[in-house]
Image (cartoon, rainbow, N blue to C red):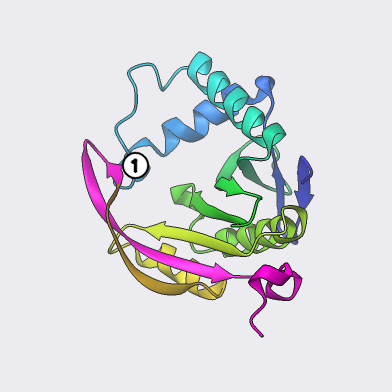
Amino acid sequence: MDFLYETKHLYIRTLIDDDAGILLDYCKRNAGFFSEYETEYPENYFTEEYQRMLIKGYMQQFLKSTGVRYYLFEKDNDERIVGTVGLSRIICGEERSAVLSYKLDRDFCGKGYATEACAELLNRAAKGFRLHRIEADILPGNVKSVAVAERLGFKHEGKARLSHRVGNAWADHERYSLIIGVDELPPAYSRS
């Protein structure tokens, strides 16, 4: 996996320490919008120091190949984050799986950016990590996220009971999955 990718409309890249200010701006602009889908934020979340700590943590995951977090920038403005895509819980052994996440700035929804960025990430990760299965857990009622997952070929599998914290409580999520790289599976996974 590389640190930067380019698609038709976007630059998709990792962040460095110097990006803490633009990450903080993104978080502040969308605090109310994201709060409907995320756990409560720590007291110092809206500080550059905390955002810098997050950037370092994501870079450690990237270097260990256990997770990747990319930020989206429109090509004509590389100083304003418009969204993020990532893979967590990457398992490169026999399971070869990961969990996809994505979110967009409230002002950039409906432009196809989430689908464009996720498609690029999935293509790169499938090759780079030789993944077989990608999961996406979506809060019930999040119609836009479901539409992104379905455009990418994810199939609904059922409900993951009390799987993620939203606000200060555990919440059910709908589980979607995408099976990829079947032709590259080792003999133990052969379907014949």
Image coordinates of residue 5 in percent, x first then y, are 77, 50
Q: Is residue 95 visible?
A: yes
| Magenta stretch encompasses residue 35 | no
Q: Residue furthest left?
A: 169
Q: Above or below — where is 148 with respect to 100? A: below
Count of numbered badges drawn on the protein: 1
Q: Above or below — where is 91 with respect to 31? A: below
Q: Nearer the viewer, residue 67 or 106?
A: 67
- Residue drawn where x is 77% and y is 46% of the image: 1
Q: For mark 1, give the secondary structure.
A: loop
The image quarter containing residue 159 is bottom left
Q: Nearer the viewer, residue 23 or 131?
A: 131
> Horizontal placement of 185 versus 135: left or right?
right
- Residue drawn where x is 67% and y is 69% of the image: 188
Image coordinates of residue 102 in percent, x first then y, are 51, 52
Image coordinates of residue 80 in percent, x first then y, are 61, 37
Q: Above or below — where is 51 with respect to 131? A: above
**Which quarter of the rendered picture does the C terminus lie within?**
bottom right
Pointer 1: residues within 10 angstroms few (<14), some, or many (20+)?
Answer: some
Q: Residue furthest bottom?
A: 192
| Magenta stretch encompasses residue 189 | yes
- Residue drawn where x is 62% and y is 33% of the image: 61
Per the rendered image, the range of residues in magenta is 164-192
> Horizontal placement of 22 versus 147: left or right?
right
> Horizontal placement of 14 versus 105: left or right?
right
- Residue drawn where x is 70% and y is 55% of the image: 125
**Amino acid type of the residue that numbered disc 1 sits on in the rendered structure:** Glu
Q: Nearer the viewer, residue 180 or 9?
A: 180
Q: Nearer the viewer, residue 180 or 148?
A: 180
Residue that label 1 marks? 38
Q: Is residue 85 visible?
A: no
Image coordinates of residue 36 in percent, x first then y, are 29, 46
